[in-house]
């Protein structure tokens, strides 16, 4: 079996996934002030919640200095002033470590914001700017024809003019990413989510990550990959894990369309992936419609969470899903607002959804008691449109390490049994 190595601690990783700018109520549009506003302590105060939920780490959205949503970075080494300053970061790291939580940061290394000082110098100084080789530029009439005020054409991320693509063939860009990763790993974080990794040549990561691992061999690297040949990307890039969008889609689609055959097929694909790497699994994140909204029934959202915690992968719970939050991702400048909400001061102020929270605690507990599920082999035993039975067994170790999961859609129900037939989890909507 051709498997990439990964840090041993990730076998037990269960993430609470948070979008800090939204969580803390920071302004996203029409940001008029660049003064430091200490909002990050609000997130730090929720560390006990992540522990009580049963998670072992925080998977954080973008936190570096940017001009709007966080994915338009202008300084990789500075906390966004809307969140606070270095002392606030240190306090979060300290609180997480004291609670036994790992920390993974969001690295936006495919592109920078148009206001990044390096790109502003290129606009001001033309082809002779020190950072001109950071970007993929086309100068009207050629570099020799440049004159002050002449702006080059530049590659963008998915057509967004405010997001300037980096040139990943540039040694300077490679060094930039290595330096940024080492800086924050040295500050106490444990890994990186590589935003838009699918848009970056895998060979770039294959050059960068070994250099970082030389100093931090236990660092974990998660690539955001929406579509493509997952196995080939992992092998060529040396990234530890990828976002498993195929499984995400099959989960909500099979529940919504009453078609467990789709999920059964996807679980076969999932097992094939797991022979090479352990995917990062989820039923919601900062870029997707809330699972309770997507499937149209909170009871079906319980089935989605049950699948998440009983198949192979490194699972994450997107903040609010543990309370059955609703929210639809739409198009347009404000399209993410519903799925990136502010959280209250404490869990006591979340009066709705407590029943879903308790179910998540039970499912996370089941997962923690069966850590071999991280790379389990899952096989379908029975499948109809509205009923699915599958078994997940340990890839290594005792043959008795197995659970059997039965899902029903009419009415929604879940039953998880152990190898001896004992009930481990049940839900009847």
Image: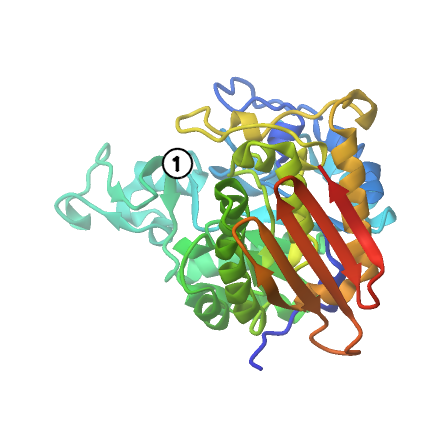
Residue at the far bottom in the pictured view:
1
Query: Residue 228 at x, y = what percent?
Result: 40, 60
Instruction: Judge from the rendering whether residue 84 lies leftward or rightward of residue 145; answer left or right.
Output: right
Secondary structure, mark 1, is loop
Q: Toward the viewer: 395 or 58?
A: 395
Query: Residue 337 at x, y = what percent?
Result: 53, 25
Quadrant of the rendered image containing residue 276:
bottom right
Q: Toward the viewer: 367 or 215?
A: 367
Q: Residue at x 53, y 44 (%)?
A: 252
Q: Work out whether residue 80 can be spotted.
A: no
Give the answer, above or below, for where 194 lies relative to 123. Answer: below
Quadrant of the rendered image containing residue 300:
top right
Give the class, few, some or many, for how many residues have Cα within 10 Å of label 1's Cα (few <14, many ≥20). Answer: many
Query: Residue 166 at x, y = what percent?
Result: 39, 51
Quadrant of the rendered image containing residue 26:
top right
Residue at the far left in the pictured view:
141
Q: Residue at x 12, y 45 (%)?
A: 141
Query: Residue 74 at x, y = what percent?
Result: 49, 38
Q: Toward the viewer: 237 or 13?
A: 13
Number of numbered discs present?
1
Q: Work out whether residue 165 can be spotted.
A: yes
Give the answer, above or below, for where 272 lies relative to 115. Answer: below
Q: Residue at x 77, y 78 (%)?
A: 399
Instruction: Judge from the rendering whether residue 362 lies leftward or rightward of residue 334; answer left or right.
Output: right
Quadrant position of the N terminus in the picture: bottom right
Quadrant position of the C terminus in the picture: top right
Q: Circle 1 sits on which residue?
A: 114
Q: Residue at x 65, y 24 (%)?
A: 342
């Amino acid at each position: 079996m051709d498997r990439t190595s990964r840090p041993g601690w990730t076998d037990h990783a269960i993430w609470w996934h948070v979008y800090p700018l939204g969580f803390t109520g920071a302004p996203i549009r029409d940001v008029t002030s660049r003064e430091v506003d200490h909002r990050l302590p609000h997130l730090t105060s929720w560390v006990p919640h992540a522990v009580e939920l049963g998670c072992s780490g925080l998977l954080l959205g973008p936190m570096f200095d940017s001009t709007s949503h966080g994915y338009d970075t202008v300084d990789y080494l500075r906390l966004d002033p809307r969140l606070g300053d270095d002392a606030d970061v240190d306090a979060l790291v300290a609180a997480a470590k004291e609670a036994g939580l790992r920390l993974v940061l969001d690295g936006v290394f495919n592109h920078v914001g148009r206001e990044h000082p390096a790109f502003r110098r290129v606009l001001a100084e033309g082809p002779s700017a020190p950072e001109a080789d950071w970007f993929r530029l086309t100068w009207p009439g050629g570099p020799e024809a440049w004159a002050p005020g002449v702006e080059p054409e530049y590659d963008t991320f998915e057509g967004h003019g405010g997001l300037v693509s980096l040139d990943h063939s540039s040694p300077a860009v490679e060094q930039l990413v290595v330096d940024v990763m080492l800086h924050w790993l040295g500050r106490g974080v444990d890994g990186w989510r590589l935003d838009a990794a699918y848009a970056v040549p895998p060979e770039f990561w294959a050059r960068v990550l070994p250099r970082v691992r030389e100093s931090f061999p236990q660092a974990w690297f998660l690539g955001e990959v929406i579509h493509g040949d997952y196995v080939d990307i992992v092998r060529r890039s040396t990234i530890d894990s990828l976002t498993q969008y195929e499984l995400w889609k099959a989960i909500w689609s099979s529940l919504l369309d009453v078609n467990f055959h789709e999920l059964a097929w996807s679980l076969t694909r999932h097992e094939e992936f797991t022979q090479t790497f352990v995917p990062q699994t989820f039923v919601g994140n900062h870029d997707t419609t809330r699972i309770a909204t997507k499937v149209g029934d909170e009871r079906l959202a319980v089935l989605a969470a049950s699948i998440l915690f009983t198949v192979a992968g490194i699972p994450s719970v997107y903040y609010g899903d543990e309370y059955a939050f609703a929210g639809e991702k739409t198009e347009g400048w404000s399209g993410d607002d519903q799925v990136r909400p502010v959280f209250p001061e404490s869990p006591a102020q979340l009066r709705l959804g407590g029943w879903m929270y308790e179910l998540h605690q039970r499912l996370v507990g089941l997962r923690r008691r069966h850590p071999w599920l991280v790379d389990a082999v899952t096989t379908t035993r029975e499948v109809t449109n509205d009923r699915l039975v599958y078994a997940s067994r340990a890839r290594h170790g005792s043959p008795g390490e197995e659970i059997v999961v039965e899902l029903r859609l009419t009415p929604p129900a879940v039953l998880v049994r152990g190898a001896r037939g004992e009930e481990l989890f049940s839900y009847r909507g």
